[in-house]
Amino acid sequence: METLSTNRSHGGVQGVYRHAAAATGTDMTFSVFVPDHEEGARLPVVWYLSGLTCTHANVTEKGEFRRACSELGLIFVAPDTSPRGEDVADDAAGAYDFGLGAGFYVDATEAPFARHYRMWSYIVDELPELISAQFPADMTRQSIMGHSMGGHGALTIGLTHPDRFSAVSAFAPIVAPTQVPWGQKALGGYLGDDRAAWLRHDAVALIERGARFPDLLVDQGEDDQFLSEQLRPGLLADACARAGIELTLRLRPGYDHSYYFISTFMESHLRWHARRLQTGIKP
């Protein structure tokens, strides 16, 4: 692991790191904030998955999470959204919603994407091993959150691994990618035409097929330009109601899809996570 930068902030250290990832066959860059702590202490970990077009840098620079993480004693990990490099396949037309910056947190099976686009394995298996080895992380206390495409990733990973994560939340998530254009394009391109293979990467479908989590938190801006066509949080609300999952869905008047929205409610999400991670610090 190579350290690209470290900066002192809010009583902790914000670092950016790079390593050669076996899952993707590429170098991958990620950021980690570690608050000050007693020597030998292990801290709970919050994973943040970013949305379309983003890298680790968007939330690192604009997410406004460090003060709350320092107060609550939380490590905050922000991976990239796709493999990158000159030999990594991209959308032929250069579209923003497929290819580079749009890995959709799946392991691709279709050529030419199957060679590098293995973001599910990277996020679920490889990066946690690196974080556990290199940082003072208590891997028995993990939670996951994300935005838009990353909200989709957080929901599907959390629902698939409910024993690993103490909390799951999302900002403006793509809740049912099999039913919306962004998801249909990505899942078809990465996983092929067999729609049955798409269902394990659809939060609503996972819940309908029996996946359970005690409670979920979603914030959604009512002025989000993608709300009705791509996000459709009502589908998640209906699925949770039928399954008996407690969903806190907060519709925020006047807010859009941007980091102005995310940063406004970031602290609220982190306190939600801290309570469920049992940090020992009053959230």
Image (cartoon, rainbow, N blue to C red):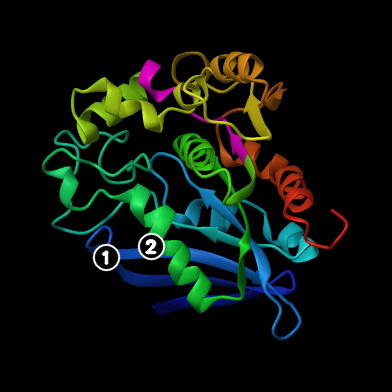
Q: What residue is at 21 percent from the left and 59 percent from the top? A: 85
Residue 107 on image: x %, y %? 28, 44
Dot placed on the residue nearer the N-terminal end, 2 or 1: 1
The quadrant in which the N terminus is found is bottom left
Write down the residue under mark 2.
126
Q: Give the range drawn in magenta.
A: 169-179
Amino acid carrying mark 1 in the image: Ala
Q: What residue is at 63 percent from the left and 25 percent from the top? A: 221
The residue nearer to you, when weighing 89 against 123, is: 123
Write down the residue under mark 1.
22
Residue 112 on image: x %, y %? 11, 44
What is the secondary structure assignment of the residue under circle 2? helix
Task: Say whether residue 34 is left or right of residue 2.
Answer: right
Task: Say whether residue 263 is left or right of residue 149.
Answer: right
Q: Quadrant of residue 72?
A: bottom right
For label 1, the crowd category at 10 Å Cα-Cα, with few meaning under 14, some 14 to 19 and many 20 or more, is: some
Q: Does the magenta stretch include residue 172?
A: yes
Q: What residue is at 16 percent from the left and 51 percent from the top? A: 115
Q: What residue is at 71 percent from the left and 78 percent from the top? A: 41
